[in-house]
Amino acid sequence: MNADNPCLLSDPDISGIGVRAAIYIQNLLSFIPAIWALWDGEVSLYELESVETQSTTILITAFAILISAMVQITTLGLSSFQASIVLNLSWMNNTNTFIYFLLYVQHKSQPGPAPIEPKLSAWIRHARNKLSFRRMMAEVRGLFQPGFRAKKEQRLIGSNDIEKQLEGNQDTKHPQQSYIKNVFRRIVFLLGSLHLTIMAVLGVWIWSERGSFRASNSCPIQSTVILGHHVSLGSKGLRGWSLAIYSLFLVPGLNLVVPAVFFLLLYIGYQAWYGKHQSKSTNSIVPIIIGMVFLIAINLAFIVDTELTLQQSTDQDGSNWTFGQVLAMLLIAIPLRDVVETIIQRREKRTEKQKRKIYTEALRKEIERQKEGMESAHSWISRGADVNVKAEGFDCVTALQVASYYGNKEFVELLLDKGADPNIQGGKYGTALLAALDAGYKEIVELLLSKRADPNIQGGYYGTALQAASCHGYKEIVELLLDKGADPNIQGGKYGTALLAALDAGYKEIAELLLDKGADPNIQGGKYETALQTASLRGYKEIVELLLDKKADPNIQCGEYGTALQAASCCGYKEIVELLLDKGADPNIQGGKYGTALQAASYWGYKEIVELLLHKGADPNIQGESVF
């Protein structure tokens, strides 16, 4: 340092060429892994965490120059031009926070488990969830009480565990390590915020006490360079703007809001515009690339301004190599290592992708062979084949459907552990759950439901899993499905509803169970239109009584037999006819193939039923169209 210069023009450990070069190279190199992560349009969890590690390392080392500058202010003082260099370099270092933020936005928005909608309100809810005190306390308790966290994770964490399973994360094997990672995950935001705060403190300190600058009329450097323009250090406008900007970034946490909202609005605005003009939803990475280009431009602007500011100095101390400069240059090895790792990772990823394609095609062929070839499927899956590959045109279109249909529990567990989606639809059975139900494999049904198989998906012959279980009389499976949220009133498939499926074979206990869980006895659909018509036609008196007790309407008119009374009359079920009449069935309702209940009983010669109907007010003079 030049002791005769009152401006203290240079400190090689703060603004020396080695320090500057190290920071320039570190920051510019940090964009390479980030851009490569975006190259295929998706940011994996591994890529996100790699960039997080890199950004965190740079931010940690960035604290050194700020602390050094603040120490020098209190001891030797700091020149105006040194202060501007320190702040320029600090702004550059902090762009790493937003490199990571852009990748985080893309990762959370892309298709996958619980993607965040491109809406500001959705991101605000996401931020509230991440920052909620309740969530943080759950994570902290999880460090010491794994059981507590296990009970709370689904409600507080949401899709985080699903994402880790799909990404192949092994943290679940070491839960204590997993909790620690969750507590310190996204630490780059914490470091970035603290770095902004310390930088803002330095900026406010220097600009509010300009004596610290040692700037005076005798100082040979009285200006700094901003976007290529020389601005006087004594400018009131510069001081006012500087104080305003640095004051905005003083408060930890809040100092990330303005830049984060800027990038989010850029992303959300582009997605809304693109979706409107393309008439479809999108998840384009264009706004993320624009954000990256913006950050690169900021870095280049600071490099140019810093070098132009330094050109004003005739002091040569800044070019002297000191221990601090050598140490700074050694730190370039960190981003260089990250670039090399990214190159290696991309090559490995390309090779793995090619292998995966070959293994997946082999697995697809095994699925086409159905049971005969599934033994070989284990090896293709263990090598990395896509467990969700489909083979159209077969009874079972996925490996999980085949394994479920044949009751191969061990293979089902393997597929689910490898990320097989139990809700993929297709083929004769619709889903793996429906395939397992065809033969009543309760253990496999339980396994699939535990891995988030949706019991309400419609497909295949039976419509829903609840219909399949009901028509086969699998009471325990019906109870299991209802406990897992199966809706008994979903319509579709051969029988129309689960209640109609159960009644077709007279499963009273299952019908009672469904009714207790909210099944509507008056839904129309299926082969015989209503549950009461079905039970009346089949002669299930006890079920008819049950349905009537559950508010089944005997006068609903629809289908081939018109009403439940007509259905019972045409089959000669006198006791059911009496029961229906006692519950308010109208014998004169017209409809169906026989016209009225009296016509149906007369046609088939059921004298006692004819007398009963006449006694209950049936009109013998009603005319109807005959279908015979």
Image: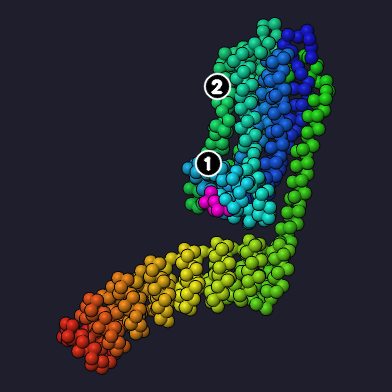
Residue 194 percent coordinates (x, y): 63, 30
The span shown in magenta is: 150-156
- Say whether residue 73 is left or right of residue 596: right
Q: Earlier in the sequence, mark 1 or mark 2?
A: 1
Residue 296 percent coordinates (x, y): 66, 34
Residue 394 percent coordinates (x, y): 59, 75
Which residue is painted at 74% across and 50% down in the image? 346
- Number of numbered tags placed on the structure image: 2
- Say whether residue 447 is left or right of residue 314: left
Foreground: 339 or 446?
Answer: 446
Question: What whole-number distance in Å separates the C-alpha atoms at marks 1 and 2?
Answer: 30 Å
List the residue tagged with mark 2: 244
Q: Amino acid at mark 1?
A: Ser
Q: Amino acid at mark 2?
A: Ala
Which residue is painted at 55% across and 73% down in the image? 442
List the residue tagged with mark 1: 132
Q: From this viewpoint, which residue is outermost toward the top? A: 218
Residue 216 placement: quadrant:
top right
Residue 172 percent coordinates (x, y): 65, 54
Which image quadrant: the C terminus? bottom left
Q: Residues within 10 Å of mark 2 (few under 14, many from 20)?
A: few
Which residue is painted at 76% across and 42% down in the image? 339
Report the predominant secondary structure element of the magenta stretch: helix
